[in-house]
Amino acid sequence: LLQYLATLACLCGWVCDYAPKLPSVSVSPSAEIVEGSSVTLTCSSDANPAANYTWYKENGDSPKASGQIFTITDFRAEHSGNYSYSITWKSDLLILITYLCVFLVNSTMIMNIIRLTVVVLMLIPLLLLSLWTR
Protein backbone atom coordinates (compact mmCIF):
# COMPACT_ATOMS: atom_id res chain seq x y z
CA LEU A 1 0.00 0.00 0.00
CA LEU A 2 2.83 2.38 0.85
CA GLN A 3 4.52 1.78 -2.52
CA TYR A 4 1.17 2.34 -4.28
CA LEU A 5 0.70 5.68 -2.48
CA ALA A 6 4.26 6.76 -3.33
CA THR A 7 3.70 5.91 -7.01
CA LEU A 8 0.37 7.76 -6.98
CA ALA A 9 2.07 10.81 -5.43
CA CYS A 10 4.68 10.82 -8.22
CA LEU A 11 1.99 10.54 -10.87
CA CYS A 12 0.13 13.48 -9.34
CA GLY A 13 3.20 15.67 -9.78
CA TRP A 14 4.49 15.65 -6.25
CA VAL A 15 8.24 15.65 -5.75
CA CYS A 16 9.64 12.14 -5.73
CA ASP A 17 13.26 11.21 -5.09
CA TYR A 18 14.80 8.29 -6.95
CA ALA A 19 18.41 7.22 -7.31
CA PRO A 20 20.16 7.13 -10.68
CA LYS A 21 19.23 4.26 -12.93
CA LEU A 22 21.92 2.14 -14.56
CA PRO A 23 23.83 4.63 -16.74
CA SER A 24 24.42 4.35 -20.45
CA VAL A 25 27.76 5.52 -21.75
CA SER A 26 28.85 6.54 -25.23
CA VAL A 27 31.85 7.90 -27.10
CA SER A 28 31.34 10.09 -30.15
CA PRO A 29 32.58 9.61 -32.76
CA SER A 30 32.32 5.86 -32.32
CA ALA A 31 34.68 5.21 -35.26
CA GLU A 32 38.33 6.20 -35.53
CA ILE A 33 39.39 9.31 -33.69
CA VAL A 34 41.66 11.50 -35.79
CA GLU A 35 44.09 14.03 -34.36
CA GLY A 36 42.56 17.50 -34.11
CA SER A 37 38.99 16.24 -34.03
CA SER A 38 36.50 16.68 -31.21
CA VAL A 39 35.60 13.73 -28.95
CA THR A 40 32.59 13.63 -26.64
CA LEU A 41 32.11 11.20 -23.75
CA THR A 42 28.54 11.00 -22.46
CA CYS A 43 27.09 9.32 -19.39
CA SER A 44 23.30 9.30 -19.18
CA SER A 45 21.19 8.32 -16.21
CA ASP A 46 17.90 9.56 -14.84
CA ALA A 47 17.65 10.63 -11.18
CA ASN A 48 15.68 13.01 -9.02
CA PRO A 49 17.24 15.15 -7.74
CA ALA A 50 19.82 15.13 -10.52
CA ALA A 51 23.07 13.28 -9.92
CA ASN A 52 26.55 14.77 -10.29
CA TYR A 53 29.03 13.25 -12.74
CA THR A 54 32.82 13.53 -12.56
CA TRP A 55 35.21 12.33 -15.29
CA TYR A 56 38.75 11.07 -14.66
CA LYS A 57 41.62 9.93 -16.87
CA GLU A 58 43.48 6.73 -15.98
CA ASN A 59 46.44 7.28 -13.63
CA GLY A 60 45.15 10.73 -12.76
CA ASP A 61 43.59 11.57 -9.43
CA SER A 62 42.34 15.01 -10.36
CA PRO A 63 39.00 15.28 -12.16
CA LYS A 64 39.12 16.16 -15.86
CA ALA A 65 35.54 17.41 -16.11
CA SER A 66 32.20 17.44 -14.35
CA GLY A 67 28.78 16.91 -15.85
CA GLN A 68 27.16 14.23 -17.96
CA ILE A 69 29.03 15.33 -21.08
CA PHE A 70 32.82 15.60 -21.34
CA THR A 71 34.09 17.05 -24.62
CA ILE A 72 37.74 17.06 -25.64
CA THR A 73 38.31 19.54 -28.45
CA ASP A 74 41.43 19.31 -30.60
CA PHE A 75 42.12 15.68 -29.61
CA ARG A 76 45.87 14.90 -29.38
CA ALA A 77 47.95 11.80 -28.60
CA GLU A 78 48.23 12.80 -24.93
CA HIS A 79 44.43 12.60 -24.66
CA SER A 80 44.48 8.90 -25.60
CA GLY A 81 43.82 6.53 -22.74
CA ASN A 82 41.20 5.09 -20.45
CA TYR A 83 38.58 7.32 -18.89
CA SER A 84 36.27 6.63 -15.98
CA TYR A 85 33.50 8.53 -14.25
CA SER A 86 31.82 8.62 -10.89
CA ILE A 87 28.21 9.40 -10.06
CA THR A 88 27.26 11.04 -6.79
CA TRP A 89 23.70 11.47 -5.63
CA LYS A 90 22.66 13.24 -2.45
CA SER A 91 26.34 13.43 -1.37
CA ASP A 92 26.83 9.65 -1.66
CA LEU A 93 29.22 8.09 -4.17
CA LEU A 94 27.03 5.60 -5.97
CA ILE A 95 28.91 4.34 -8.97
CA LEU A 96 32.49 4.40 -10.16
CA ILE A 97 32.74 2.97 -13.63
CA THR A 98 35.90 2.24 -15.53
CA TYR A 99 36.94 2.28 -18.36
CA LEU A 100 36.11 3.99 -21.60
CA CYS A 101 38.98 3.46 -24.01
CA VAL A 102 39.62 6.45 -26.23
CA PHE A 103 42.61 6.25 -28.56
CA LEU A 104 43.90 8.40 -31.37
CA VAL A 105 44.29 6.79 -34.76
CA ASN A 106 47.33 8.10 -36.56
CA SER A 107 46.38 9.29 -40.07
CA THR A 108 49.79 8.14 -41.38
CA MET A 109 49.06 4.65 -40.09
CA ILE A 110 45.69 4.67 -41.89
CA MET A 111 47.36 5.68 -45.17
CA ASN A 112 49.95 2.93 -44.80
CA ILE A 113 47.21 0.35 -44.22
CA ILE A 114 45.38 1.57 -47.33
CA ARG A 115 48.59 1.40 -49.39
CA LEU A 116 49.33 -2.13 -48.18
CA THR A 117 45.77 -3.22 -48.99
CA VAL A 118 46.00 -1.78 -52.51
CA VAL A 119 49.34 -3.51 -53.14
CA VAL A 120 47.98 -6.86 -51.93
CA LEU A 121 44.86 -6.48 -54.07
CA MET A 122 47.03 -5.70 -57.10
CA LEU A 123 49.25 -8.73 -56.49
CA ILE A 124 46.35 -11.20 -56.31
CA PRO A 125 45.42 -10.92 -60.04
CA LEU A 126 49.12 -11.21 -60.98
CA LEU A 127 49.44 -14.35 -58.88
CA LEU A 128 46.30 -15.83 -60.41
CA LEU A 129 47.51 -14.96 -63.92
CA SER A 130 50.88 -16.60 -63.34
CA LEU A 131 49.20 -19.75 -61.99
CA TRP A 132 46.78 -19.84 -64.92
CA THR A 133 49.53 -19.56 -67.56
CA ARG A 134 51.48 -22.51 -66.17
Image (cartoon, rainbow, N blue to C red):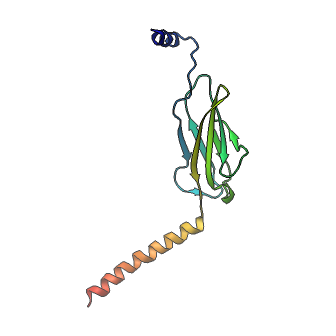
Residue 70 at x, y = what percent? 65, 42
Q: Where does the image place residue 6, in percent across and percent down from the top left?
A: 50, 12
The answer to whether residue 91 is above or below residue 6 is below
Q: How many marks?
A: 0
- Tell me where residue 35 sits by quadrant: bottom right
Q: Give the residue furthest to the right.
A: 62
Determine the residue positioned at 49% across, 69% down: 114
Left or right, residue 121 beside residue 31: left
Residue at the spot x=72%, y=46% of the render? Answer: 61
Vertical placement of residue 53 versus 117, above or below = above
In this view, which residue lies farthest toward the bottom? 134
Residue 33 coordinates in the image, percent (x, y):
58, 55
**Image quadrant where one finds the N terminus:** top left
Residue 125, horizontal then vertical, whole percent = 34, 79
Residue 68 in view in this figure: no
Q: Point out the image quarter for the C terminus.
A: bottom left
The one nearer the camera, 114 or 89, is 89
Q: Nearer the viewer, residue 134 or 101?
A: 101
Residue 43 lies, with reference to residue 20, above or below; the image says below
Report if residue 37 is visible in the image: yes
The residue lying at 65 percent from left, 44 percent from top is: 71
Q: Quadrant of residue 93?
A: top right
Between 67 and 131, the one lying in front of the other is 67
Residue 119 vertical position relative to residue 133 in the rendered view, above or below: above
